Amino acid sequence: MIPSPILPSPLVPYAASHVLTFSAEGTCTTLWTDKLPLAELGTMRMRRASWIDFNEHTQGWEVRFDPHAADFVFSDPSREACLAWEHEKLNQS
C-alpha cells in the first residue's frame, strides 16, 4: 500500500507567522508553537488562552476565552478555521 501524501490545509497560514511580545522586564508573551524553541528563552509559565470545543448539537466548533461562558466568541464547522481565528485574534493583543 502506498501512503497518501499529507497535503497542507488551505487554512494553515496562521502557522506561517508568529508574534512574540516582550515587556520592559523581559517577559515574553506568545501563543505556543512547536515551530520555535521557546524553552530556550528561559523558564516558562503557561496559561491557556482559549477553549475550542465541539458542540454536538450544532455540529460545529466553538471558541471561548472563558470555559464557563455560555456564549462563544467565534464558531465554525472547521476546527482549523477556529485555530486560525484564535491565532489572528490573540496576535492582535
Image (tube, grey):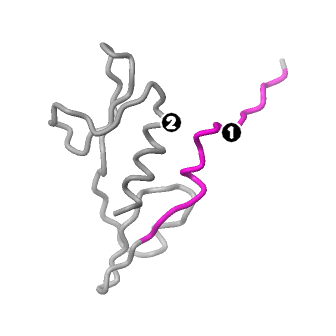
Q: Of all residues shown, which one is farthest toward the top?
A: 57
Q: Is residue 23 left or right of residue 67?
A: right
Q: Is residue 15 magenta?
A: yes
Q: Secondary structure at mark 1?
A: loop
Q: Quadrant of the N terminus?
A: top right
Q: Quadrant of the C terminus?
A: bottom left
| Count of numbered badges drawn on the protein | 2
Residue 57 against residue 34 in the figure, above or below: above
Residue 54 against residue 11 in the figure, above or below: above
Q: Position of residue 66 (x, y in %)?
A: 20, 43
- Observer-nearest of 30 and 39: 30
Residue 27 against residue 1 in the figure, above or below: below
Q: Position of residue 92 (x, y in %)?
A: 39, 61
Residue 91 against residue 80 in the figure, above or below: below
Q: Quadrant of residue 45?
A: bottom left
Per the image, the residue denoted by label 2 is 80
- Identify the residue at image location x=68%, y=39%: 8
Residues in magenta, as a range: 2-20
- Identify the residue at image location x=16%, y=36%: 69
Q: Quadrant of residue 50?
A: top left
Q: Secondary structure at mark 2?
A: helix
- Observer-nearest of 91 and 43: 91
